[in-house]
Amino acid sequence: MKKLILLTFIVICCILVIPCKIYAMDIAVGATTWLAWGSRFDDVQKTSVRENGSYAFDPTFLYGPALSAKFSDDFNLTFVYLYGKFNYNEKIYADAGGSYYAESKAVRSDSDLALNYRLSDYFKVFIGTKYMAYEVNSSFLNYSGTYCESHSKHTSIGPGMGFTGTFPVIDNIFLLGTVSGFYLFSAGETFVDNGIYGKRPADLTIGYNEYGINSTASIAYYIAPASTVISLGARFQYFIIKYNKYEPFFLINSIENRIYGITLTATYSFSI
């Protein structure tokens, strides 16, 4: 299903672009990084050993390529991929002996492929495909001295759309802003656990959907002699993972995520 969605989008892009009368294609190739903080809120089925909880992620760098291809004055295709690792301590439960926390490590990928259409000199609308994936490993030592751990692998893909604004300030300096929303699908999250999140040890696949928003704001400077754009800004991402409740031994109903931080991007432009 994921491959079909991506293939369909690529075909649509080709259909829209091929009829355009092209004399040259403008290409931008570069790299982007995101110094990100974040937080997570778990909504769970409350039990004597599990409760709702909020957790802060340690700051981390996500990084990856940024690409753009301009086919005409009206259409361009953009691609951004980010990869990084998050660490956080998650409260599992509390009793008379104290509170127990799991150490969690998440490896995360986030990519966007979008077809942009120019509405005016200042605004563009875009549609595209968003892909998010991450693996989480958690572990803790409980009150009885038992070592508990879990591993989950999470992959989702789906459509997204939004608007981009570009506003000249002075000379080669301009402001950029983007707002978008997305809704992602998955065949399921594989989950292996020996007692952290479930009512009993489990090895199962949990279905879910995922939806949220992205927003960015940055200031960019075009270095004309080097055909390079440098932009510095901020990005905020909010999304909810909503689990299907067909598995009675899985305690998590949903996970709410907020990720925010500073972005830095550099791209070099040329024509072919």
Image (spheres, grey):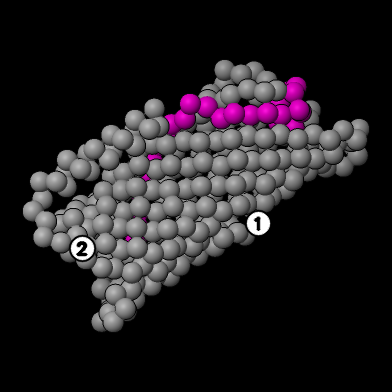
Please tell me whether residue 271 belongs to the stretch shown in magenta: no
| Helix, strand or loop for disc 1 | strand
Residue 86 location, x and y as percent? Answer: 62, 51
Task: Report which residue position mark 2 lands on.
Answer: 272
Tell me the residue at 69%/50% (across/down).
88
Residue 58 shows which numbered tag?
1
In the rendered structure, which segment of residues is drawn in magenta? 177-201
Tell me the residue at 47%/48% (across/down).
110
Q: CA distance from mark 2 to mark 1?
A: 43 Å
Mark toward the viewer: 2 or 1: 2
User: Along the horizontal axis of the image, is 131 left or right of 162?
Assistant: right
Residue 50 location, x and y as percent? Answer: 74, 32
Please tell me which of labels 2 and 1 falls first in the chain: 1
Tell me the residue at 57%/21% (across/down).
245
Residue 87 location, x and y as percent? Answer: 67, 51
Compared to residue 266, the image places residue 182 above or below, namely above
The N terminus, quarter of image: top left
Q: Residues within 10 Å of mark 1 (few under 14, many from 20)?
A: some
Q: Residues within 10 Å of mark 2 (few under 14, many from 20)?
A: few
| Helix, strand or loop for disc 2 | loop
Of residues 74 and 170, the one nearer the viewer is: 74
The C terminus, quarter of image: bottom left
